[in-house]
Image (cartoon, helix red, strand yellow):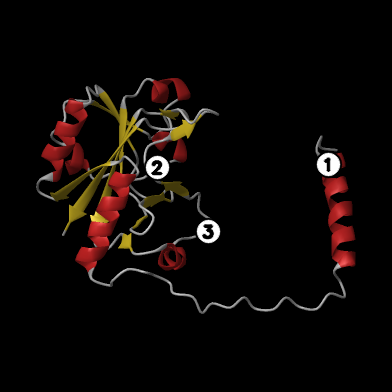
Amino acid sequence: MSTDSPARASRERILAKVRAAVADAPPASEAPRDYLDSHTSDDPAVVLGLLHDNLADYRAIVHRSTEAQLPELLARLLAGHGARSVAVPPGLPGAWLAGTDAQQRHDAPPLTPYELDATDAVVTGCALAIAETGTIVLDAGPAQGRRALTLVPDLHICVVRAPEQVVASVPRAMPRLDPTRPLTWISGPSATSDIELDRVEGVHGPRTLEVILLLD
């Protein structure tokens, strides 16, 4: 018998009582969905500008780039932060880091916790970016990697393809996200405050978030 059998049995007893208690309850009414799903113009330039402003408001450092300019920009950002090593998630286009002198540490097989802790930066793509909230969403898809990659290194550089990965609002983002995937929602660098409201960055994630809006 497995060690969690008593816990499982207790859970089943509790759930059985809940099911019995609600067995005769009327079906829940459908929640009204008559609210606006966005408060932003559908103009892609307006949506992108709003995303840029809100990312910066959350203390992310925002850049705009073309595909041709991207390798030079990434190399410059990594060098500017003194990054001697960079974590590379599976599926990241090889050309993106072609210009950097930083040691590229590919996460396949997965880097150990000690190797990841000793890595200065990580470069990833994303699943979506939400303009009205200044939020980037990762889902562990290609060019994003596992969650630890973007939580341990001190510097996270995230590339957002615009306009195809940019949506105006959370309601417009939800249908494009798979709830069964490990979703990470990022609004600025990791930060917390103590009881005196002294802000400290980098406590439970990267101290610095740089976002590159990659324009078609």
Secondary structure of residue under mark 3: loop
Q: Residue 213: percent from the left, percent from the top? A: 22, 51
x, y percent for residue 78: 21, 30
From the viewer's perspective, is 105 left or right of 110?
left
The disc at residue 179 is 3
* Dot in front, 3 or 2: 3
Q: Is residue 177 above or below residue 78?
A: below
Residue 95 located left or right of residue 144: left
141 and 160: which is toward the camera: 160
**Secondary structure category for the residue under label 2:** loop
Q: Residue at x 51, y 27 (%)?
A: 196
Q: Sequence-wise, which precedes: disc 3 or disc 1?
A: 1
Instruction: Indicate which disc residue 7 carries.
Output: 1
Q: Residue at x 64, y 78 (%)?
A: 30
Which callout, 3 or 2, points at the residue further toward the start of the chain? 2
Within the image, what quadrant is residue 167 found in?
Answer: bottom left
Q: Give the Cα distance between marks 3 and 1.
A: 27 Å
- First in sequence: mark 1 or mark 2? 1
Label 1–label 2 contact, CB within 8 A: no
Indicate the secondary structure of the residue bearing disc 1. helix
Circle 1: residue type: Ala
Are the residues flagged by discs 3 and 2 in contact, CB closer than 8 Å? Answer: no
- Is the Cβ of the residue at disc 3 closer than 8 Å to that at disc 1? no
Q: Amino acid at mark 2?
A: Gly
Q: Which mark is residue 198?
A: none
Res. 145 mark: 2
Residue 53, position as x, y percentages in the image? 26, 52
Q: Position of residue 182 (x, y in %)?
A: 50, 49
